[in-house]
Amino acid sequence: MELGSREKAILALERRGFPGAGAKERAIREELGLAPVRYYQLLNALLDDERALAHDPVTVNRLRRIRATRRTER
């Protein structure tokens, strides 16, 4: 199975850079129609999905490394 359009849009948003505080959250609301909390829940689940890794390995691996670093810092 392939990723759905929402999952692909989430990964595409993560590939982008954002200029300032609040810009990413605004893009999440405007482009995806999601609350930021829900977005991050979906993103976290997506990082464990092998289909996401196959679709965009660079982004998924980068985000997995960030997540692992933050977990060890706690």
Image (spheres, helix red, strand yellow):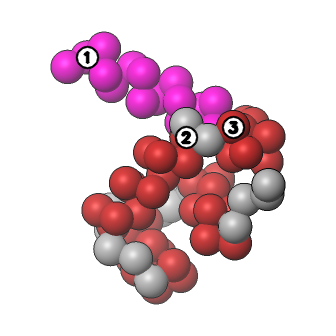
Q: Residue type at mark 1?
A: Glu
Of circles 2 and 3, which is in front? Answer: 3
Could you tell me what secondary structure mostly forms the magenta stretch?
Answer: helix
Residue 13 in the image: state x and y as whole percent.
59, 62
Image quarter of the N terminus: bottom right
Task: Give the quadrant of the C terminus.
Answer: top left
Residue 68, how many percent across, how many down? 42, 21
Query: Magenta segment, which residues?
Result: 59-74
50 to the left or right of 2: left
Question: Which residue was labeled with disc 3?
Answer: 50
From the top left corner, tell me how far across and down residue 20 is, in percent.
39, 62
Please give the residue where the numbered disc 2 appears in the rendered image.
47
Q: CA distance from mark 1 to mark 2?
A: 19 Å
Question: Given the current orientation, which residue lies at the most extreme front position?
Answer: 1
- Distance from Cα at disc 1 to Cα at disc 3: 25 Å
Instruction: Tell me the element at label 2.
Output: helix
